[in-house]
Image (cartoon, helix red, strand yellow):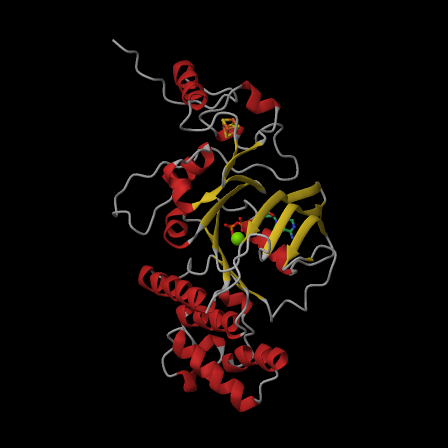
Amino acid sequence: MTYPTDEEHPLLVLEDYRIGFNTERGLAKAVDGVSLTLKRGQTLGIVGESGSGKTVLNRGVIGLLAARNTVESGSAKFEGEELVGENRQAFWGTKMAMIFQDPMTSLNPVMKVGNQVMEPLRQHQKLSKSEAKKRVADIFTLVGIPEPIKRLDQYPHELSGGMRQRVMISIALAIEPDLLIADEPTTSLDVTVQKYILDLLTRVQKEQGMSMVLITHDLGVARGRADEILVMYGGRVMEHAPTEDLFEKMSHPYTSALFSSIPHLHHKKHTRLTPIPGTPPDIVEPPTGCRFAPRCTYAQEICLLESPPMTQEGNHRYACFFPIGIQQGQEALTTNQQRGHTASGLQIQKKAEAI
Ligand SMILES: Nc1ncnc2c1ncn2[C@@H]1O[C@H](COP(=O)(O)OP(=O)(O)OP(=O)(O)O)[C@@H](O)[C@H]1O
Ligand code: SF4
Ligand SMILES: [Mg+2]
């Protein structure tokens, strides 16, 4: 089967997309001007530390944020249709599905799991009860739930964490969505189950030609599975590139710091990790200039004053004044190493004097 991959008709296009939350201290700018394009059949990996806005971005697009204190602006188009300002229920359960970060709180504790998977099927695809039941049993088999018929009548508390996660995945896959958002789908699972689930999602994604957003802390996981990777920090895009390109020409100091700070599935047990110094930015009152400046070993004076514009080189883009891999970046790092600190005062190891 072939699927339309026409560049002119991408599945999802965000332009200057923003989500803020009204809080007592002011507007918390959780997503602050994100632009991206997701092509049909492609997987986009979104990576970033905790609090960088990955979940809010995706819950926002799919229309799952409580409207009361939420301010959404910019543009988000799904199949060419504007979502911002519109009710997204028509898409929810039919064209878009999300696997949530925490399966324990996303399943209904007092409803049999079979019914939880069947409900959207009966509602949106108008299947009879017996058709829906058969389909759910098939999906349970697909996602590796043993004794699927017996499981239909069980409640979430009767299942292990791994089985509950598979039920969540069944709910999402049952409707054969065009877009599947998988938010840290495996964080709560052990390594072998993680691999099984990720392999399964990749397989189904390829078979059904659906597009996938894979949210993960782990650049290593995104590397093996995503066509493109988008790196977020403080609600903004720091770097975005086709996966191979990102690793070949990693340009943003934050991407590099993130990569060095996170254990990867393929790391040996005792690999030394380098934590990123400091803490993520305050999203109510973010720092002037580059948001990463207080923690960046490359930071120069201009980084504290001005926000770096997005540089676009082919399909690779990054927001940094002193990117890694080019002379300006190398000089910035050397300057800081020689003075023993960055422009924001972050202490770094002095370079040993050449003899
Ligand atoms: N309802 C809300 N009101 C105010 N702030 C919120 C609300 N929901 C999320 N936030 C804030 O928005 C920011 C982004 O949160 P988000 O959950 O998207 O991060 P994340 O990248 O998914 O992190 P993690 O990796 O831990 O899941 C955080 O600072 C969070 O505290
Ligand atoms: S070099 Fe400057 S612009 Fe680039 S990430 Fe560091 S602080 Fe930001
Ligand atoms: Mg999250």
Q: Residue 65: image x %, image y %?
A: 66, 58
View extreme (top): residue: 355
Could you tell me which residue is drawn at 50 percent across and 79 percent down?
113
173 in relation to 100, above or below: below
Query: Residue extending furthest bottom?
Result: 130
Is there any visible trace of residue 153 in the rendered image? no
Q: How many marks?
A: 0
Can residue 280 be seen in this snapshot? Answer: yes
Give the image quarter of residue 143. Answer: bottom left
Residue in front for this viewpoint, 347 or 115: 115
On the image, the x and y values in percent for residue 98 come to: 54, 63
Quick check: 328 above or below 355?
below
**Quarter of the figure with residue 244:** top left
Viewer-proximal residue among 170 and 103? 170
11 lies left or right of 207: right
Q: Quadrant of the C terminus?
A: top left
Residue that appears at 68% across and 69% down: 90
Return the residue nearer the eye: 350 or 74.
Answer: 74
Residue 166: % across, % down: 43, 71
Quick one: 258 or 283, which is closer to the camera? 258
Residue at image location 59% in from the left, 67% down from the top = 95
The answer to whether residue 237 is above or below residue 95 is above
Q: Is residue 348 above or below residue 256?
A: above
Where residue 23 sits in the image (x, y, percent)? 70, 46
